[in-house]
Amino acid sequence: MGRAARIAQTQGLGRLVRTYRQAFPLWFPALFVVMAVVIVGATALNPTLGVGVKAAGAAVPLVALGVIWWVIADVRLVLCEGGILVGRFFPLLTPYAFPYRAIEPRGVTCVSDVGRLPSATGRTYGSTLFHLPQSRRGLVLDGPLPAQARVRGGAVSQVMDTGADTVRGGKLWAFAYRGAPEELVSTLQRGMLAQQVPHAEALPRIAPPERAVADGVNGLAR
């Protein structure tokens, strides 16, 4: 059983149904490739170092770079039978978990430029936003406050928390992903209907089609 499945089971969310990994702009992986090339080049071209020293000198920073990539890039949105896991799945970190009942279906929006959410809405970038400024396709939903969804954590993990910003007093959650929005919305709706979430039947009429953030986000408190 994988870590996501164990967390879902512990939180009472049932089995995993569909997993989406966070989509990153093309420059993000390219940046790590460039750093790796610089590390290898700097050690390989140093004439004062022996072969063993060069190998060790390149290996240590490359391993560190790999760990940094893992920490940053292993961000997932996991749709389970009874709710959602979202966040970082690195061994020392824990994602957020909340049931479908904590989501307002009328506050779900498919957007084409999720990276513009903070600037277009005037919101501060916080712990519930999983995207970069240049991120494109994304899902925005009206969910619980981060403190209510946090599986584990103390004062340090609360530094990026921001206050309620939806009409019903909830929190905007946003996730950049790759894939068809209709498929994501359909999977989300099936989970909500199974949990008898009010207004879940309206989700396919409200969330799609994709729109620009500037054209409006469902449930956002102005």
Image (cartoon, rainbow, N blue to C red):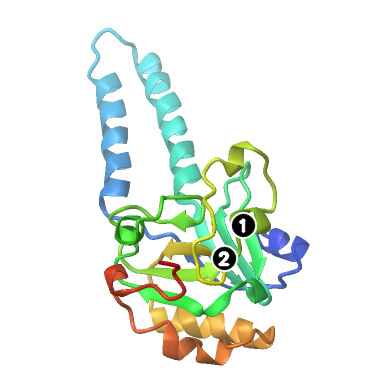
Instruction: Tell me if I can see residue 1 in this picture.
Output: no
Instruction: Tell me if I can see residue 35 in this picture.
Output: yes
Q: Which residue is drawn at 28% across and 55% down?
A: 134
In the displayed structure image, the side of residue 39 where residue 151 appears, left or right: right
Q: Residues within 10 Å of mark 1 (few under 14, many from 20)?
A: many
The dot on residue 136 is: none
Q: SS of the residue at dot 2?
A: loop
The dot on residue 170 is: 2
Give the CA distance from mark 1 to mark 2: 15 Å
In the rendered image of this protein, does residue 14 appear above or below residue 92?
A: below
Locate the N terminus by quadrant. bottom right
Q: Residue at x 34, y 84 (%)?
A: 209
Percent across and percent down for residue 221 are 45, 68
Instruction: Tell me the kind of residue under disc 1.
Output: Tyr
Q: How crowded is mark 2: few (under 14 residues within 10 Å), some or many (20 or more)?
A: many
Percent across and percent down for residue 147 are 65, 53
In the displayed structure image, the side of residue 104 where residue 36 appears, left or right: left
In the rendered image of this protein, does residue 165 appear above or below residue 187?
A: above
Q: Nearer the viewer, residue 212 or 46?
A: 212
Give residue 113's quadrant in the image.
Answer: bottom left
Percent across and percent down for residue 193 are 63, 88
Q: Residue at x 25, y 49 (%)?
A: 27
Q: Nearer the viewer, residue 126 or 11?
A: 126
Q: Which residue is drawn at 27% across and 46% down?
A: 30
Instruction: Tell me the kind of residue under disc 2.
Output: Gly
Percent across and percent down for residue 16 are 64, 71
Locate the C terminus by quadrant. bottom left
Asked if the residues shown at circle 1 and circle 2 are in contact, with their CB atoms under 8 angstroms apart, the answer is no
Badge 1 is on which residue? 96
